[in-house]
Structures are given as C-alpha cells and as structure tokens.
Image (cartoon, rainbow, N blue to C red):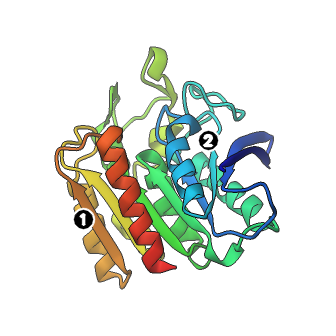
Amino acid sequence: MITESKFSCMRDSFTIRGTVYADDAADEKKVPVIICHGFTADMKRTAPYGKYLAEKGFRAFTFDFCGGGFETVSDGDFHTDMTPMTEVEDLKCVMDYVKQRDDVYADRLILMGCSQGGFVSSLTAAERNTEVYALILIYPALCIPDDARKGSMQVIRFDPENIPDVIGEGRFRLNGEYARSVVKMYVFREIKGYQGPVLIIHGTGDTVVSYEYAVKASEVYTENGNDCVLHLLEDAPHGFNDEYLDQACELIGEFTEEIL
C-alpha cells in the first residue's frame, strides 16, 4: 500500500513543502529519490513518478520549488522570487533534509528532474557530486542559458544585452534575475562536475526543448566518464502522459534496478 505524508524544510525565510511516497508506513530504510518539477508546474505533475518509485521500493520525495509555478504551495512568488539558481538552493535544502532522515540510505540519494527541474538537478548534482548516487533527467531544459542569450525564453522576449528588472508580462511576468542568473552560463561545461550514473529520457516531438540538447548532454557525460544512458521516445512531446509516461517509468525502473 502506497502511503503519502507531508514534509517541509526551510531555505532562508522560505518554507519548502513536499510529499513523501512509500509502500508502507514503517520507518524501514529505503533508497531516496528526490523529484523536481518543471517551469510553471508543481509537485502534482511529478506525483505519478513518486507513486511509481514508491511501488518499486523507493522512498520518493516530491516538492514545490519556492515560487516555482502557478499553483505551488511552498513559499515565494512566481513573478518575483524564482530563478533557476534559487531552485538550485531549494533542491540543496531538500537534499539536506532528506539525508538527515532515519528512514533513508543517505549514501544512495538519487536526483530526478523534469524540464527546468532537470536543468536544476544537473547543476545541483555537479555542485554536490559526492552526495548524488545517480541522476535522472526527463526532457531536461538544458536550453535555458542559450535561450537567455537569445533573449527568447518560451513566450518571454527581452534584450539579452540589457536585461530589465522585469521580463515578460501578465501570467509570465518574471524577475529579470531569472535570465541574468544564467545568461553567462555554459551548461555543458557546468554539468561535467557530476561523475555518477545518468539516465536521460527525451521525446523527439518536443517543441519546447529540442531533444538535441539531450543528445549533446549524453555525449558530454559519456566523454566525462559517466555511465550515461539516453532514451529518445519517438514523437513524445514536452511533458509525458499516458503511454509516454508509462514508457518513461519503465525505463526509470530498468535504470534503477541496474545501478542498485
């Protein structure tokens, strides 16, 4: 039986709130997986992965980034408080919380991220290489720094040479620091800091993040000495549902069985 329980931790003055999925209510130790949602999303989108991993015997942790989406329950405002780098700090806070729990194997911590959550997970894994046992990237938005340099981040347009304090408008209004924090970043250099096993899953029908970024990341990780596995799902879009979600879960299950 899959149980769900709430958890929270603090990053500066912000409270991060999340959900723990496990296949029982006992304190039995399990391998932990922290799952990160994407831009404008929340942990409801990552819940299917959490439940699947719990069924496979993991203790899965989903959470909302501070200001990370339109309906997140963690503190922070989407329009003013969130950047990719604040999300890196959020993830490090969740890692520290998870590692001190008595019901997990802290030395086998797995990071998993979808879209922007994948970008954030790859940066965090590089920064905390020795603390991350494995990394799972689902259609990771490794395009974010390139998009910032183009002055075109999804529906948001701006002058990359003179990034204003506010970019975008309406629902997609953001703090200009969102772009400034990554505009000089070269992601394929940054991710080399991580040296553990990597799984990347991306759809060839993705019109938000080209699957070529996944291909390039796989090449970089492999050249870096990582044990990296890349799966391209034919015609799959950005965001997996139905058969694509099932395929992704099956591939995650195969990967985790092999590395553990």
Residue 158 place in picture, x, y as percent = 35, 29
From the viewer's perspective, is 138 left or right of 25?
left
Residue 36 place in picture, x, y as percent = 54, 49
Give the SS element for disc 2: loop
From the viewer's perspective, is 43 left or right of 225?
right
Identify the residue at image location x=65%, y=38%.
Answer: 66
Question: Dot 1, how many residues are within 10 Å of its Cα: few (below 14), some (14-19), or many (20+)?
Answer: few
Amino acid tagged 2: Phe
Determine whether 239 is above or below 53 in the image. Answer: above
Identify the residue at image location x=22%, y=48%.
Answer: 210
Residue 135 place in picture, x, y as percent = 47, 67
Determine whether 26 is above or below 13 in the image. Answer: below
Give the SS element for disc 1: helix
Q: Where is mark 2, residue-wise?
A: 65
Q: CA distance from mark 1 to mark 2?
A: 27 Å
Q: Nearer the viewer, residue 257 or 215?
A: 257
- Tell me, yes or no, whether the two marked residues, 1 and 2, touch with CB atoms within 8 Å: no
Looking at the rendering, which quadrant does residue 91 occupy?
A: bottom right
Question: Dot 2, how many residues are within 10 Å of its Cα: few (below 14), some (14-19), or many (20+)?
Answer: many
Q: Nearer the viewer, residue 16 or 156?
A: 16
Q: Where is mark 1, residue-wise?
A: 216
Residue 148 appears anywhere in the view: yes
Identify the residue at image location x=36%, y=46%.
Answer: 245
